[in-house]
Image (tube, rainbow, N blue to C red):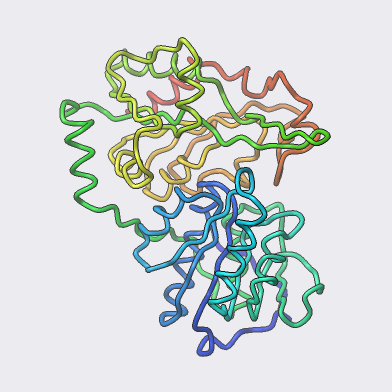
Amino acid sequence: MCVSTLQKDLPSIDRTRVKKILVGCHHGIGDVVMILPVLERLHHYFINAQMDVFIGNPAEKELIRLLGYGCRCYSFNVKEESGFALLSLIKKMRRERYDLAIDLGWSPRRYDVWLFHLAGCKKIISGGNTGRFGKRYIGFEDKRNEHRVVRNMQCLTALGIPAQPIRFPVLNIPEQVSACMKRKFLSSCAGKQMVGICVGTGDFFYRKGLKKHRYDAKQWGYEKFCGLAGELARSGAQIILFGGEKEKRELDGRSITFAADAINTIGTTSMTETMALLNACDLVIGGDTGLLHCAAALNKKILAVFGPTDPNIIGPVTPLCRVIQKQRDCIPCYRLSATRETIECRRRLCLEEISVREVAEEAKRMLE
């Protein structure tokens, strides 16, 4: 994929005068992975500038560190942190006096743009068309029907950076971490094909009255992942289970037993350790989850199970990915964010109709 042509009247920025850059992607792990090609281009274009990143979760800092660019990270979890924490964050940003801020969060209400404005950033680049911040704001064309990575790359044109094919930067996983993970988890797996199964997906929250409700709209189901793990283990594959604290809490309250020899890392490894284990896999399987984007950045084979979301917009960017998704008139009901249709749909037939056998057979073909 290549970056689309943008409108020709965008102003350019003198890169010799840019000393500090702040890039915002205030969402999940997958969204952070999808800005990595932009960070790679910015790093090489503004070679002498300090580049920092604003993210939504402290765990994502490890992903940014793997780039080796020396980026500092700010994090703010809108689901858990208070308004006082946000004010403290804005004060920290103001002290840095950023020359340029780039909003890649794609919030429908432009929350990150407002934050960068309050933080005193001299120039703010964001998709869409708004003049509410005057000369400080530079908008670029936002083509919502294109993949998120392509949309992210469009900001580069506003900076005078030539369009190029999308390329993920090398993630520098420390050799000592890879060696430690091999000793701890993979010492008895020689000769086996390694299949990583990402059992969770990110949820979203919505308000009903004064209460917040969380909903796993993209989840295929732990029971189905359990059946898939068993099916592939019986065919001779070594299963590695991936997930975070959320998945660990939910599985602790259920009587689900995965394949006896499956390596269970759910909620027990850091982001860097997870990346090292993903890098050891021959195939990575999961729903619409950030770890599939991590696998894409590592150039791994991927089998993705999609339901209400559109893989052409937010799927892993790699020719090594195959997607299983049913054709239904209601897909995609979950577009840039959850819609009323997503919230009101409780059966999720788009995912229920995808069988364990269907996914297992496709996985075996990819392992041949």
Where residue 19 appears, x then y in whole percent? 49, 83
The answer to which of 285 and 15 lies nearer the viewer is 15
User: What residue is drawn where x is 37% and y is 59%?
Assistant: 65
Residue lying farthest top?
A: 255
Q: Is residue 170 left or right of residue 358?
A: left
User: What residue is drawn where x is 41% and y is 80%?
Assistant: 47
* Image position of 351 with respect to 30: above or below: above
From the image, which quarter does the C terminus lie in?
A: top left
Where residue 11 appears, x then y in whole percent? 69, 83
Where residue 140 appears, x then y in whole percent? 70, 70
Q: Is residue 102 left or right of residue 43?
A: right
Residue 259, image quadrant: top left
The answer to which of 62 and 83 lies nearer the viewer is 83
User: What residue is drawn where x is 70% and y is 55%?
Assistant: 107
Where residue 53 appears, x then y in whole percent? 51, 64
The answer to which of 28 and 169 lies nearer the viewer is 28
Residue 113, image quadrant: bottom right
